Image (cartoon, rainbow, N blue to C red):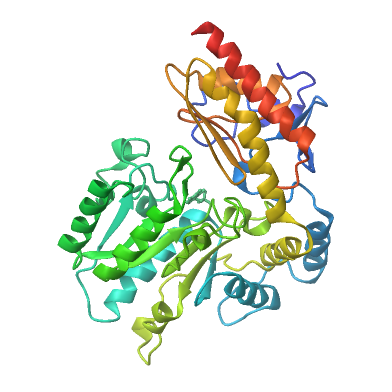
Amino acid sequence: MPQNTPAWHHDGMQNIWLPYTQMATASAALPVVSTDGVRIRLADGRELIDGISSWWTACHGYKHPHIQEALATQLAQMPHVMFAGLVHEPALRLAQRLAALLPGDLERVFFTESGSVAVEVALKMAVQYWLNQGQTARDRFVCFRHGYHGDTFATMALCDPDEGMHSLFGSVFPPQMMAELPTDDALKIGFERMLSTHRERIAAVIVEPLVQGAGGMKMHDAATLKFIAEACQRNGVLLILDEIMTGFGRTGKMFACEEAGVVPDIICLSKALTGGTLPLAATVARRHVFAAFWSDDKGAALMHGPTYMANPLACAAANASLDLFESEPRLEQVAAIEIQLRDELTACANLAGVAEVRVKGAIGAVELSGEIDLEALRRRFAECGVWIRPFGNVVYLMPPFVIDEGDLRTLTSAIHQVLSERAARI
Ligand SMILES: *Cc1c(COP(=O)(O)O)cnc(C)c1O
């Protein structure tokens, strides 16, 4: 399909290894040469409207001038310096701003470079929080079916065992406690019993609030999240919220936990933190969590420190991204996207081979039933001029918040079109 394939594409593909991809049979990855606004420009001159914000990161669209300027300034001044024994303004200002934005006393910020590592740090914080208080048996985590928390060993163990990588690596990582989301009374009782039975072993419960992303865009309500938080409190275990996908407006509030009035003990942020420009993540702890590390004992210090942590360029991008949440009407845009997604995706529910349509904030998901040829669907979407990449059994949209009504309609129409074609074959 790609015409005018550049030489770098043809030659370099012999040496690259792509994520989650069977390199022998996958159709060729498209050569991209630039991005602008909500558009991805391919080497052959075609433009695709980005329906998924580059893995849910580019909330302001691509190349927003304010972030570009902040990056240029920071690049000229100091692209990187190590973050031990030295500190710099971009990181400290960002920490202060995140603390001010986050609910409650979530106020101590530890920077890393990816979501998985932010979760790893949260797990370490939780275990060491208990160790520092003399509790040495708290070595288990409670996680939820359909959850996704990353690809490293500790985080893989927290993912859904069927959708995740347990079948490959399950013998290598420690087993964790898998719960159903407590969405009804029976499940509530079961969840509470799990916590009360094993409370002495449990370091923390971890959950993606309101929307479980990579596990299939499963949505639950604020009351369920609130119940989980209260059950954690009743049973004296920590609550970690993984807001790597939901954070920064995606579900309608700046952070999904705000909708439930929940303040977790630890929160993980990444993806949209830099507005989709540079890798950065943050693990933020409440005051009482941090207090357990504050002592004369060097052994009580948090034992983690990635080489590129708090990279100044990435922090500058994140600060500029937060500026945009203040100066441009992002949450209003999310509210408008939510209304339009409901209006325009609902029609897909009537198509053969569609199980359900779900919308929350700027997330629209169409869950499919029956046989699904992901590669064929992905190819068709690209042919329609849109960048939409279904996974598992969902076709979903997570557009940049700056997308206009017409471009969003192009995305929803493409989904209806491609799923109609599929329905005709069923
Ligand atoms: C993407 C994601 C992660 C992992 O982040 P990486 O940067 O890919 O390591 C963890 N948790 C959630 C909820 C995510 O969406």
**189 or 80: nearer the viewer:** 189
Q: Residue furthest left?
A: 197
Q: Tell whether 98 sits left or right of 60.
A: left
- Expressed as whole percent of the image width and height from the top left, the position of residue 280 reads 60, 60
- Expressed as whole percent of the image width and height from the top left, the position of residue 331 reads 68, 55
Q: Tell whether 161 sits left or right of 327.
A: left
**197 or 337: nearer the viewer:** 337
**124 or 213: nearer the viewer:** 213
Q: Is residue 86 visible?
A: yes
Q: Tell whether 17 sits left or right of 328.
A: left
**Relative to 383, is 199 above or below?**
below
Q: Is residue 400 visible?
A: no
Q: How many marks?
A: 0
Quarter of the image that includes the N terminus: top right
Q: Residue furthest top?
A: 425
**Relative to 31, is 310 above or below?**
below
Residue at left offset 64%, top offset 33%: 343
**Relative to 64, is 89 above or below?**
below
Residue at left offset 34%, top offset 42%: 160
- Expressed as whole percent of the image width and height from the top left, the position of residue 326 reads 74, 65
Residue at left offset 64%, top offset 36%: 341
Q: What is the quadrant of residue 249 in the picture? A: bottom right
Q: What is the quadrant of residue 207 in the picture? A: bottom left
